[in-house]
Image: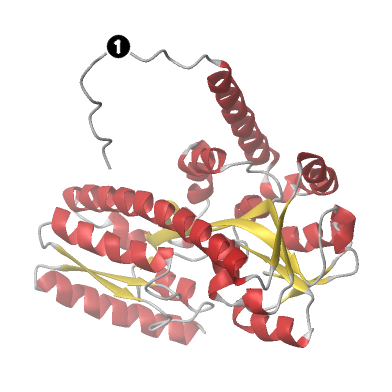
Amino acid sequence: MKLRAIAMFVLAIGISSAAQAAGEIIIKFSHVVAPDTPKGQAAERFKQVAEKLTKGKVKVEVYPNSQLYKDREEIEALQSGAVQMLAPSLSKFGPMGAPEFQLFDLPYLFPNQETLHRVMDGDVGKKLFAKLDTKGVTGLTFWDNGFKQMSSNKPMHAAADLKGLKMRIQSSKVLNAQMKALGANPQVMAFSEVYTALQQGVVDGTENPVSNFYTQKMHEVQKHMTISNHGYLGYAVIVNKNFWDGLPADVRTSLTQAMKEATAFERDVAQKDNDDALAQVIAAKSTTVYTLTAAERADWQKVLLPIQKDFESVIGADLILSANATAAQVAKEQADAASKPAASKPAASKPAAPAKK
């Protein structure tokens, strides 16, 4: 493994030197999903905007579908300098030595997107990215996949309905604890194996954003889905630290702006994909979709919220407290806005200007 890392580093140095000699900065952006996914589309958007803003100083080469490195290889490749940019799922950072990123696996920590994005884009996100500095990695931003829903071949209205079910999870101590709290049997399994495992009854169910559920055709082998919004699945866009720090200041500024634009685009696409996928799952009629009532949601929260306390020593009580404080602030702002009377319409005779898109 060490020899391989050294070889990748030497290769990266050679490529970087050749690019610099030619007066062009190359960014290899590797990822493991298809080009038409939110992540894939956002990587292409970043390429377009970055090349435009840097006026040809930077060339971004996007490599989707694990063309360069597979899921388990890509972070090592980034650290060695063989690629410059990745967007791995947040679950990858715990094994890297940054268990604080398991914050995003905690159930019912983020009641809505507004809370989620404020946490990501605020002090908590900055603190998490600071944990990567000693790993040779710089964190740039967070991208969405979506909120997770439960699926299985039986109705799941009460938390107790999951008791005894074999539920597939990503490799995560938090997700393992989550399923055990529900009385389910957690089964760690590669995502590529889930459809067949569901089809053959190796596992009874799983948790996913609806877009994953639909594009992987899980609605063909799952009779029930509960809209629980109990957890979140997302990505972090990261870059090799030495490469990033070594860029000219003006180039780094332009790339930061390009990433900001790509992030806004990605989050919109991710939400639309999940909304469209839910409509398609309902239209297919092979899966019954059920949304928890307020009382049922409270029942699930009663079972799952204690996990936040259980993982304070692993993730950091300050990070969990900050996320919950943000959720409370957002809830207060939304309640205040809802309580205000609607503004009276002005008696203007001319038509309103069209909304900006």
Tell me what residue is drawn at x 85 percent, y 65 percent. 184
Query: Vertically, is 14 above or below 50?
Result: below
In this view of the protein, which residue sits in the foreground, 326 or 135? 326
Quarter of the image for the C terminus: give it: top left
Task: Locate residue 296: give its quadrant.
Answer: top right
According to the picture, the residue beneath numbered tag 1 turns out to be 347
Where disc 1 sits, the SS reads loop
Relative to 336, 172 lies left or right? right
Task: Locate residue 198: give its quadrant.
Answer: bottom right
- Image position, residue 8 (x, y; %): 37, 82
Query: Vertically, is 285 above or below 356?
Result: below
- Image position, residue 252 (x, y; %): 24, 51
In this view of the protein, which residue sits in the foreground, 186 or 4? 186
Residue 352 visible (yes or no): yes
Relative to 56, 12 lies left or right? right
Tell me what residue is drawn at x 52 percent, y 14 percent. 341
Q: Residues within 10 Å of mark 1 (few under 14, many from 20)?
A: few
Tell me what residue is drawn at x 76 percent, y 88 percent. 200
- Image position, residue 210 (x, y; %): 59, 63
Relative to 38, 26 lies left or right? left
- Image position, residue 250 (x, y; %): 17, 48
In this view of the protein, which residue sits in the foreground, 22 or 222? 222
Residue 172 visible (yes or no): no
Q: Residue furthest front?
A: 349
Task: Locate residue 152: give its quadrant.
Answer: bottom right
Circle 1: residue type:
Ala
Total numbered labels placed on residues in the image: 1
Query: Vertically, is 8 above or below 170?
Result: below
Tell me what residue is drawn at x 51 percent, y 56 percent. 275
